Image (tube, grey):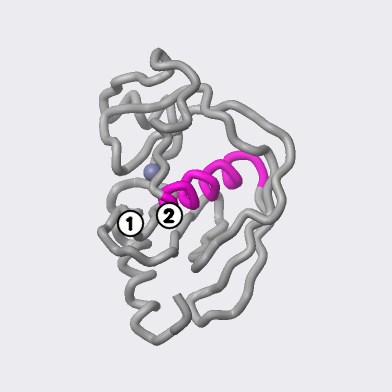
């Protein structure tokens, strides 16, 4: 995407709203049927909207549990993600930005960037038994994040 026009701010606002209504911590445009390379994420006071994101550095590996707004009723366990990443991209006006992230925030960003490439946490399960059906309440407890 090369053109950054004012309508993108509305898209970003809509995405934040959709994410918040669903109690999510991240949302990628393909999840609302928009084929634009952008995601939004909000976690512990950090709020970002990143266009054309790219992971330019990744360090370490950790396993964790993930839920997904596109896969309601399920969580995946032992999903491997880099511990520490650096994401390069553009903000809503097209300005180049760099976002360093660690731990959960890094996991959320990796999950969202996967969405832009059509990859779901299901594709990252090492073992089928790591997929669990959960109620809404259990999902909140177990995953702590829906992305
Ligand atoms: Zn997701």
Front-most of residues 123 and 111? 123
Instruction: Note whether 127 is above or below 104 in the view shown.
Output: above
Mark yes or no: residue 77 visible: yes
Residue at point 46%, 25% (across, down): 125
Disc 2 within 8 angstroms of ligand 1 (CB): no
Q: Are marks 1 and 2 in contact (CB under 8 Å)?
A: yes
Disc 1 within 8 angstroms of ligand 1 (CB): no
- Label 1: which residue? 30
Residue at point 33%, 56% (across, down): 30
**Rendered image: mark on residue 47:** none
Mark nearer the N terminus (1 vs 2): 1
Q: Secondary structure at mark 2?
A: helix
| Outermost residue to the top | 129
Mark yes or no: residue 147 visible: no
- Label 2: which residue? 116
Quadrant observed for ligand 1 in the rendered image: top left
**Residue 22 image position (x, y, % from top left):** 29, 48
Q: Which residues are magenta?
A: 102-117
Quadrant of the rendered image containing residue 80: top right
Count of marks, rendered view: 2
**Residue 137 image position (x, y, % from top left):** 30, 27
**Residue 7 image position (x, y, % from top left):** 34, 82
In the displayed structure image, the side of residue 43 where residue 118 appears, left or right? left
Front-most of residues 115 and 8? 115
């Amino acid at each position: 995407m090369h053109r950054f026009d004012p309508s993108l701010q509305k898209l970003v606002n809509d995405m934040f709203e959709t994410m918040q209504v669903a109690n999510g911590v991240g949302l990628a445009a393909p999840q609302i049927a928009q084929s634009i390379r952008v995601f939004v994420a909000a976690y512990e006071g950090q709020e970002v909207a990143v266009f054309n994101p790219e992971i330019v550095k990744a360090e370490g590996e950790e396993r964790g549990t993930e839920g997904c707004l596109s896969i309601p009723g399920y969580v995946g366990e032992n999903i491997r993600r880099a511990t520490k990443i650096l994401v390069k991209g553009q903000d809503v006006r097209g300005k180049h930005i760099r976002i360093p992230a660690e731990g959960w925030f890094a996991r959320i960003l990796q999950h969202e960037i996967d969405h832009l490439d059509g990859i779901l946490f299901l594709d990252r399960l090492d073992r089928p038994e790591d997929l669990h059906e959960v109620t809404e309440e259990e999902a909140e407890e177990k995953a702590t994040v829906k992305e």
